[in-house]
Image: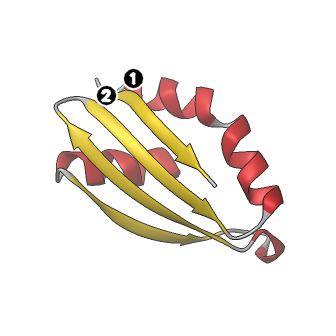
Amino acid sequence: QMSGGIQNLSQAGGGEIRVRLKPENLGEIYLRVKTEGNQVGLQIRASNEKAKEIIESSLDHLKESLSAHHLSLGHVDVS
């Protein structure tokens, strides 16, 4: 789900989205996307530590998903 939103924002040159996670105890994430050519940079702010850990463990899957759309993941800042 997140990779689809990132792909849409990257086609627009970047942008920001806020996602409410389920289950609700994971809180929400704030995602800022910046693109240069086919390079996608991300700044991700998680509202709690568990959500941050899940995002960090999912970055390889995100790279693969973006690669399928001819995009590559550049700098990622997760906090």
What residue type is disc 1 on?
Answer: Ser
Q: Position of residue 32 (x, y in %)?
A: 39, 58
Horizontally, residue 55 falls left or right of residue 71, namely: right
- Within the image, what quadrant is residue 22 found in? bottom right
Q: Position of residue 26 (x, y in %)?
A: 78, 68
The residue to which callout 2 is attached is: 71
Secondary element under disc 2, as helix, strand or loop, is loop
The residue to which callout 1 is attached is: 67
Tell me how many marks there are.
2
Report the quarter where the C terminus lies.
bottom right
What residue type is disc 2 on?
Answer: Leu
7 shown above or below 15:
above
Q: Residues within 10 Å of mark 2 (few under 14, many from 20)?
A: some
Q: How is the image coloured?
A: secondary structure
3 shown above or below 62:
below
Q: Residue at x 28, y 30 (%)?
A: 39
Q: Residues within 10 Å of mark 1 (few under 14, many from 20)?
A: few
Q: Residue at x 77, y 76 (%)?
A: 24
The numbered disc on residue 42 is none
Horizontally, residue 48 falls left or right of residue 37, namely: right
Mark 1 to mark 2 CA distance (whole Å) = 5 Å
Q: Residue at x 39, y 30 (%)?
A: 74
Q: Position of residue 31 (x, y in %)?
A: 47, 60
Q: Are marks 1 and 2 in contact (CB under 8 Å)?
A: yes
Q: Residue at x 23, y 29 (%)?
A: 38
Secondary element under disc 1, as helix, strand or loop, is helix
30 shown above or below 56:
below
Horizontally, residue 64 falls left or right of residue 24, namely: left
Q: Position of residue 76 (x, y in %)?
A: 49, 39
